[in-house]
Image: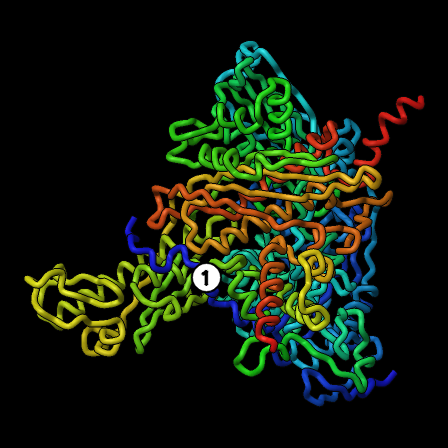
Amino acid sequence: MPKLHVTTFVNGEPVEFLCEPYETMLDALRGQLGLTGSKEGCASGDCGACSITLDGRLICSCLMLAAEAEGHEIRTIEGMAKGDKLHPLQQKFLEHAALQCGICTSGMLVASEALLAKNSNPTEEEVRFWLAGNLCRCTGYDKIVRAVMETAAEMREMRP
Amino acid sequence: MNVVNNKWIGQRTIRPDGVDKVTGRAAFAADTTMPGMIWGKVLRSPHPHARIKSINTAKAERLPGVKAVVTSRDIVDFTIEKGAVMLGIQDMRWMCRNVMARDKALFPGHPVAAVAATTEAIAAEACKLIEVDYEVLPWAIEIDDALKPDAPILHEFNRFDGKPSNIMGRIESRKGDIAQGFKDADIVIERSFTTRPVHQGYIEPHACLISVAADGKTTIWSSSQGQFMVRAMSSMLTGIPQSDIRAIPAEIGGGFGGKTIVYLEPLATLLAKKSGRPVKMVMTREEVMRATGPTSGSKSTVKIGAKKDGTIVAAHGSFYLQAGAFPGSPIRGAVGCSFAPYDIPHVLSEGFDVCSNRSKVAAYRAPGAPIGAYAVECVLDELAEALKMDPLALRLKNAAKEGTKAAHGPVFPRIGYIETLEAAKNHPHYAAPLGKYQGRGVASGFWFNAGGESSAQVNITEDGNVVVTTGHPDIGGSRAGIANICAELLGIDYKRVSVIIGDTQTVGFSNLTGGSRVLFASSMVVTQAADKVIATLRERAAKIWEIDPEAVKWENGAAHPVSPNAGQFEPLTLADLAEKAPLQGGPIGASVQLNTQGAEGGFGTHICDVEVDVDLGIVRVIRYTAVQDVGRAVHPSYVEGQLQGGVAQGIGWALNEEYIYNKDGKVDNPGFLDYRMPVCSDLPMLDCALVEVPNPKHPQGVKGVGEVPLVPVMAAVANAVHNALGKRFYSLPMSPPKVSAALDAPAQQAAE
């Protein structure tokens, strides 16, 4: 079977690539598009290290076929900072030491941003259940949850 | 202690590698490519135990796109008869057989051959074309099965008590005379425990990218807990001299001990050499779970005798640990650490290293110690109950302190164990009320900690800033700790210090990131290097001012005359002296290489509250406090992070994690869905109480902190479950089916 031609948007930029019909979005991102911020921890949708958004919806890019990106809008960790200005979540993760090895961090941040887009005032329980699809083996999640809650509080204050 | 002002030590600075990691730029092992790169895949044994009669790779080699195939014939053989060839704690006789099976495959997942091809798909297809003729043998996985008189023997050469055996070794620590000790006791409690094998669970699978040039010059890009370990093992297994191998440490996505040995690097090196192309290999999660080292499953018996007043007079522990396919289970940690928190006159602690048909174990956070502590700390809880004593009071009464001789050898210097017990006792958590089906447990733990070889360079840049190069992969934030210390010593802003991890050809030998040694050892060499740099800076200033170097002091990032008597000069800053360096003797920098000594052991005491859902058998941890003597918290956030991470792993080990084997001897849950590590919604906030009793043998008082936090956890959880339900569990994990069965037991008995 010939490769498929895909036209899509990644982090707001138009991109085109060729992919095998069986290729995952994660492979296309990491391979052809050179966006290696999304990680493969399991390839089965259990660890969340490959989290991206598809038209604003949080998904595991290892469970999506690359060809399905046609005509949609993908966002990855690489699109989170605006130039040299970090997103408040990124800044707060640094201040709270909410990362150790960093392999889950991209996915955690993408998932957290998706949460705050839906719910600007999440409870601790809501944060914990929302992030239950993102495994972290280093931190015990404590500092991650604190960073997300504090970012949410700051972002609420910043809004008029 | 040469640090007094502490402007940076103890500050929660932003880690040097942080921005790269929150923006997705940080390059981990699987994130790099090279021009002309091809892909390697491993063919693995489907059998738990099989003799390999022949391997035919001809069909695979003919498949278009295949560039190289390797088998054990290509790997340097360390023959068993010639005796041990040790690299650190690893015997290369087992390592060469673990990376690729030779005469026998010893576990499902054991590599048998490897292929490199232009795509991953072709490499996988080629693996299927390799014909392996196996003679399938009987197998044993569980300790009891491996110890039966008619058990299949993995290593036929081995004898224990004069007979062929899967027991590959026994060690002991002994103090006093336990027979006498138990005679002296008013009360003796003896219990047996089992734990299941659990995986380190790092989220980043093993990966590497390797190029071998025509002249043999080799570049290894991989993630590991030691680029020098990767270089040495790859060299020994391929025959390429170490001087020709540049092992570059990628960012590492978690290790916890599991990345202290090689799996893929020797195979990729040989494939790259044969094919003339750079070869990339990345394990799947299933390969990680089937073929990389979890820690041992275990079977332990612990007997403790005490006087009526709670004075412990005798202790005996015997710990059988699964090594997996090759010898080397962490019996030293179980034997040495389990009783170390207590001053006991008569102790015998013995460990047995048992081979069985599962993947070779690798280190996992305080290797062996959590297994031993689980048994000992649960027995202590029963002892306290029997004596009607508070469990912390019982521990306090028997706590090791300065001058206590531990059964494993050392006499403790000033240690902070008692301080952790007192802090736990005084913590509000310990007095907080509990509700229905809720319970509280406590437990303590010890880890040896480690020093060893480290190298570092401190160089002053031409613009007067600082670059520190160390040789230890940074997993949990050690670069931030080094930057804090270096900024402190040089009296400059933290942001002016850049800390990088050198590769094997650019920094001196540095041993593994493991044993909780990195900040202890690397800050020791960095301190000495910084001291040398400061001496040079003072000499330069003295030369410029034409005074004696002794008359110059270094303060707040600048040279000053020690007193007005020495002369009246404007301070010379680091930038001033860097600018003048070319005319004053050249570049400013220093390197130091040491075999560091003086890593003293660490102690922790944990308090755990659980709530049991008695309908579903689910145990939930609802509050947790980890108290630990951390020596000196150079960067408190990353110290807390170590405690919290260790606790989370321990909660997983206690409540859910286990390898489940099917009737064919294969792991039945080789993925994150069925091998269930704690997720965010499983845990509460994990509180930390840092006790700082500085290590007298370290310039900043540093003690290792990473391993201790896992040691007490399983016992703390088990003791809490007992407190909640009045039932004791002697096997892990305390998973819902097991808890439900225990809750149903009295009802069943009543019905019968």
Q: Residue furthest left?
A: B565
Mark 1 residue crowding within 10 angstroms, few (<14) / some (14–19) / many (20+): many
Residue ID at (81%, 31%)? B742
**Residue A24 % position (x, y):** 78, 74
Chain designation of label 1? B
Examine the image and state in which quarter residue B219 appears: bottom right
B303 is higher (above) or lower (below) than B228: above
- In the rendered image, the quadrant that contains the C terminus of chain B is top right
Circle 1 sits on which residue?
B479
Q: Is residue B244 visible?
A: yes
Report the number of numbered marks. Answer: 1
**Residue B37 % position (x, y):** 65, 76
Examine the image and state in which quarter residue B61 appears: bottom right
Query: Could you say which is closer to the camera, residue B389 or residue B19?
Result: B389
Residue type highlighted by circle 1: Arg
Residue ID at (57%, 35%)? B430
Q: Residue furthest front?
A: A160
Q: Is residue B68 visible?
A: no
**Residue B705 % position (x, y):** 49, 47
Q: How is the image coloured?
A: rainbow
Label 1, secondary structure: give it: helix
